[in-house]
Amino acid sequence: MDETSVAIVGCGVISEIYLKNLTGRPGIRVKACADLIPERAAARAAQFNVPKSCSVDEVMDDNSIDVVLNLTVPKAHGQVTLAAIEKGKSVYGEKPLAATREEGQAILRAAKSKGVRVGCAPDTVLGGGLQTARKFVDDGRAGFPVAATAFMASHGPESWHGDPRWFYERGSGPLFDMGPYYLTALVNVLGPVRRVTSSARKSFPERIITSREKYGTKINVEVPTHVAAVLDFRSGVICSLMTTFDVWAANLPWIELYCSEGTVEFPDPNSFSGPVRYRMARTTWWENLSVPFRNTTNMRGLGLVDMVEARRRGREHRASLEVAYHVLDVMQAIHESSEAGRHVEIQSSCERPEPMPVGAADFVVDA
Ligand SMILES: NC(=O)c1ccc[n+]([C@@H]2O[C@H](COP(=O)([O-])OP(=O)(O)OC[C@H]3O[C@@H](n4cnc5c(N)ncnc54)[C@H](O)[C@@H]3O)[C@@H](O)[C@H]2O)c1
């Protein structure tokens, strides 16, 4: 099997699970780790026996690297992705695709002109849980979708992330950081969004870090931290979405889809597993669906494996640039709607990615 050479740029918290899942995987060779902080790159390279740690420029100039895995902070996503594309490399990156719609558009243009692949997290939508929910809906078992709710409620990452400052910068906040999980899951089932409206606020202009490394450091909040939006999908489905870093406790589902013949409860879209529950019309009980898909543990990197395999086979990859750009467009429009006090029409669209093959083993992406 021919090998695809991958270099990781950004060796922080999330790089560990990617390296765990990708090193030693047939057809993929992780050749280099890079970070603005060289010690981080060196530490990850040593931890996973990656042949070299180096600067970002060295990665970009290394013609033997096929794919850059961009795990930097959100405000750097666009710049790192564009630099890699410029060098003719394909890119798979963490969410969001970029910090702004304009950067996303630059990525669309560059990827097209260079003929390279760009894929983007979240790949949790390829996990067994969300694939099961999608199949239940696609098979028409609950009738046709009418409406949805999606809730992400927390009090922010400053109690657990080593350096949570970027979560409150442009390109992040609850909507840009966690929204991609919810929006990508919804788009995978329902297709594209037509228009949005919202109200958003910055409830606490300053936050204090309580995790160990930077304990007591103040963060100046740049972005809204409580966002309540309504999304009209092109299919007619109306979704109420709340993403917040301002709530200590809540009793809310992650995603519920209300259909003509029943309700489907999705699992946490920031996970690969179930459960998926449903309750049919005129019944009083919820039932658990059995999950006929694998990929139910922390499979981060599955989207990259799919992109590499798709390139070999000449098919579209599932964690696609088109979907990631649409999600970015929707998120920016949600903030614009709150600022302008009106609905914002969504200009972009996308196809729903192909479902995963039923019953295939972990990391197997073709039937
Ligand atoms: N932490 C999580 O649990 C988690 C989960 C899923 C997805 N993600 C996503 O993964 C990405 C990274 O998150 P993280 O928690 O690992 O962040 P982190 O702050 O722990 O690590 C980011 C790393 O990127 C490096 N970096 C920043 N700008 C760079 C640049 N221009 N060039 C090279 N390196 C650069 C930083 O030095 C740092 O080491 C984010 O987009 C986040 O949304 C994080």
Image (tube, rainbow, N blue to C red):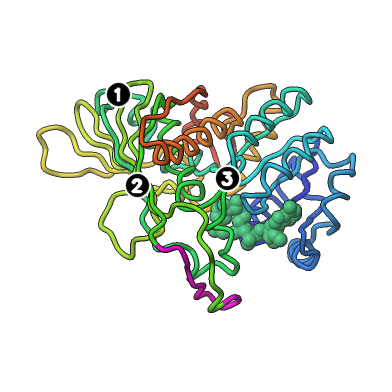
Mark 3 CB near ligand 1 (8 Å cut): yes
Q: Which amino acid does label 1 sit on?
A: Gly
Using the numbered discs, state the Cα–Cα distance from disc 3 to disc 2 in whole angstroms: 18 Å
Secondary structure type for disc 1: loop
Q: Which amino acid does label 3 sit on?
A: Lys
Residue 29: % across, % down: 78, 46
Which segment did they paint magenta?
204-214
Residue farthest to the front?
340
Residue 35 or 76: which is nearer the viewer? 76
Using the numbered discs, state the Cα–Cα distance from disc 1 to disc 2 in whole angstroms: 27 Å
What residue is shown with label 1? 140
Closer to the eye: label 3 or 1 = 3
Comes first in the chain, label 1 or label 2:
1
Rendered image: mark on residue 7: none
Q: What residue type is labelled 2?
A: Met
Classify the position of the C terminus by image quarter. Answer: top right
